[in-house]
Amino acid sequence: MYKFTTILIPLALTSIRRFLRIPMPKTTRSLSTAKTAGKNTKTGKKAKSVKSEKIAKVETKTEESTTMEEEDEKSSKDVLKSGEQKFKAYSSYTEASPFPGFRHPTHRECEVANEVLQEMHGDEVAKEFEDENTPETIPHVLDAMIIAVLSQATSWSNAKRAMNSMKAVYRSIFAYDKIAEGGRNELQETIRCGGLHIRKSMIIMTILKQAKERYGKWNLDHMFELTDEEAMKELLAFSYIGPKSASVVMGWCLKRNPFTVDTHVYRISGLWGWRPSSASREKTQSHLEITIPARYKFSLHFLLIQHGRVCPACIGGSKGGQKCTAAAKMKTLLK
């Protein structure tokens, strides 16, 4: 009877508390449970540790799997935007800026910016072009496309790590037969060191597949004979190649002298008032393509990238309050 009462009373009290919404006491374990827990503290901790390790391993595998699935899902959404749609959006502003009332940068502002940035960063940019991996030295269109993909959304040093890894595994960055034969998983592991390896391996394999299907070979050098419009249209017809990457190939390889807007250029153009604050990257590229004189496009692109890497006020993640030396010099010269 005593045992029955000791069980029944706590149950009844629990029900009453719940009905009246009275908070449960912090300690709800019975004496027997507490004693058992006391005796098995060390065993419990050990078991908990082993269990945590197992869960961590499972969660890691699940996370890796989920990441790959999420990347593929994002990529499949990108494919829905066809080459025709991409080219139509791009060509809407080839004759005039999408911001006709926005007057910056002026030709004089571009001239002064080029002069100031050349003085500050000219040597560093020149050193980059001494690197054999620098895209300007790559004579073939498909090769330039692959380099453009490897350099997307990362630093040039990370892109070079991926390139050097490809050289070690395939004997060349452009060994397309070996890359295709090895498959996406091998490529993915090969370029892991460069970052974003899951997405970039998928993009590279897709480009190689589409090039082979359309032209029967991994050679796109016929684009040298096309007009700017025709070449841009063909480049945008490849999945995952947008105006920025296409513009990179147009400039680096085809020598058509477009102005390319990457992360650094987009950020700095906003800080310097060279675009409306709400302008998208695509419309910013269209705007600067029209407003920046042809003679400054190539140099300004690379000088702005270098500036965006080192200027405390213009670097990504800057919290504000820092001074941009280049902007201050330009302001003085433009008075």
Image (cartoon, grey):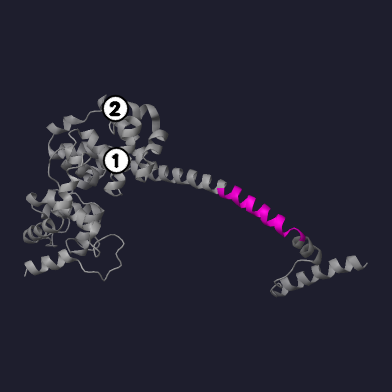
In the rendered image, the vertical position of residue 270 relative to residue 259, given as above or below: below
Residue 212, labelled with which disc?
Answer: 2
Q: Amino acid at mark 2?
A: Lys
Q: Is residue 42 magenta?
A: yes
Q: Is residue 237 visible?
A: no
Q: Magenta segment, principal secondary structure?
A: helix
How many numbered markers are drawn?
A: 2
Q: Residue at x 89, y 65 (%)?
A: 4
* Residue nearer the viewer, 10 or 167: 167
The mark that comes first in sequence, 2 or 1, is: 1
Residue 32, labelled with which disc?
Answer: none
- Quarter of the picture containing the C terminus is bottom left
Q: Is residue 262 left or right of residue 169?
A: left
Q: Residue at x 23, y 28 (%)?
A: 219
Residue 82, labelled with which disc?
Answer: 1
Assess whether mark 1 and mark 2 are in contact (beta carbons under 8 angstroms). no
Name the image quarter holding residue 257: top left
Tell us which disc is closer to us: 2 or 1: 2
In the rendered image, the vertical position of residue 6 relative to residue 289, given as above or below: below
The local secondary structure at tag 2 comes to helix
Name the image quarter holding residue 309: bottom left
Q: Is residue 300 left or right of residue 21?
A: left
Give the residues in magenta: 39-56
Q: How dense is the environment of label 2, judged by Cα within 10 Å: few (below 14), some, or many (20 and up)?
A: some
User: Most extreme residue toward the right, as rendered?
Assistant: 1
Q: Is residue 19 left or right of residue 129?
A: right
User: Most extreme residue toward the top, as rendered?
Assistant: 216
Q: How dense is the environment of label 1, judged by Cα within 10 Å: few (below 14), some, or many (20 and up)?
A: some
Residue 81, percent from left and from top: 31, 43
In the rendered image, the vertical position of residue 98 relative to residue 10, given as above or below: above
